[in-house]
Amino acid sequence: MAKRNKLEIIQNILKIIQENHNSIKPTPLLRQSNISTARFKDYFNDLIKKKFIRETGHKGNKYISLTEKGFKFLEKYKTIINFIDEFEL
Amino acid sequence: MPPRIMQQFAMQSFSTEIIYSFVIIFCSLIIYYGTKELYELSSHKGIKYFRQAFLFFALAYFFRSFIKLIVFYFNAQGILSISPRLFNPLISQVTLIFFIYFSAMAVLYLLYSVMWKKWNGNDKKVYLFHLLAFAISLFIVLSGNALAYLGVNILLFFIVLFVVYTSYKNKKKAKGHKHNLYIIYLLLSFFWIINIIDILIPSFFQNFQLLIYLASAAIFFIMVYKVLKKAGSS
């Protein structure tokens, strides 16, 4: 399997959340995203910072869901990839 | 030629110049704002440098039209040949520094947008480009030598040519199909240099000026069309 790039990993994580009725606990998300815990933490913090996802609930019962920006990313993902490919960026 | 006809001719060529600059600035800003959403969502460095290139093209053309306005107003041959008694030479020099700086940065950003991955791209290299562009502009203006500037830009064009050709060959090997985008990038850089010569040595392309403007505008229109089509902007 080819190495996934950053955008692909982000898309994978967001897609998992979306496919779980936009609500998933961190542990199953980490498992399904198929990346190391350390890398997952980096991506997770990055996605929170960029406001693609949000955390709801209290300690031990946390859920992660997509924000409007997260949905927008998924909607535009193919366009972004095509654009990068077309202009050799 | 009678002075009245000459004045009319100058006015006409100045109007053409303003329309041309407006078209290029407009196209560049469409590309810049048309890709805003894609960059905000992806934070992709290539998209960032690509957008910056067109922002700098817009800025460079703004200063270019300002230079043309000054030259037209004082009925001079070039901006550096205006008498210091008529116009403060410091304003001319600063405008020219801005023009050269923004134009060099536009080409460097375009180059970097394609090459950042291969050059292990980071924003620190961009600071080097800024420094280089500023040094070039300062050197040219202080030396007052238009031919030196021409030489620097021809060198820059050959670097673009080399990089684009190498990248094109690698891609062709990898994907097995042609990428006409490389030709557009080359034409963009080529017409950019012709535009620079036009500013510094106005008599150089006097007979082909309209043709050059039309060709440059066509390249920018193709870019706008391709960008809007791929970015999905309306």
Image (cartoon, coloured by chain):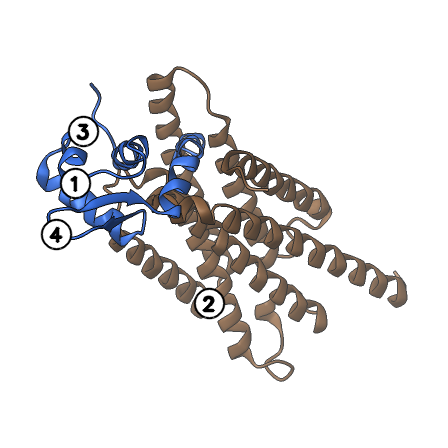
Chain displayed in brown: B
* Residue holding disc 2: B141
Judging by colour alone, the chain drawn in blue in this rendered image is A
Tag 4 residue: A59
Looking at the rendered structure, whether the residues under marks 4 and 3 are on a common chain is answered as yes
Q: Are marks 4 and 3 in contact (CB under 8 Å)?
A: no
SS state under label 3: helix
Q: Which residue is mark 1?
A: A26
Q: Type of residue at label 2?
A: Val
Question: Label 3 lies in what chain?
Answer: A
Q: Residue drawn at (67%, 46%), measured in percent from left and top?
A: B213
User: Which tag, 4 or 3, sits closer to the chain's start?
Assistant: 3
From mark 4 to mark 3, how far is it between C-alphas? 21 Å
3 or 2: mark nearer the eye = 3
Report which residue position mark 3 lands on. A32
Q: Residues within 10 Å of mark 4 (few under 14, many from 20)?
A: few
The local secondary structure at tag 4 comes to: loop
Circle 2: element type: helix
Percent of width and height locating residue A84 = 40, 35
Determine the secondary structure under disc 1: helix
Residue at figure coordinates x 20%, y 18% from the top left: A1
Q: Circle 1 marks a residue in which chain?
A: A
Q: Which mark is in front, 2 or 4? A: 4
* Residue B87 percent location from the top left of the image: 61, 80
Quadrant occupied by the N terminus of chain B = bottom right
Label 1, label 2: how many angstroms apart (C-alpha)? Answer: 59 Å
Q: Earlier in the sequence, mark 1 or mark 4?
A: 1
Quarter holding residue A77: top left
Measured as percent of width and height from the top left, residue A88 is found at 40, 33
Please tell me whether mark 4 or mark 3 is closer to you in this view.
4
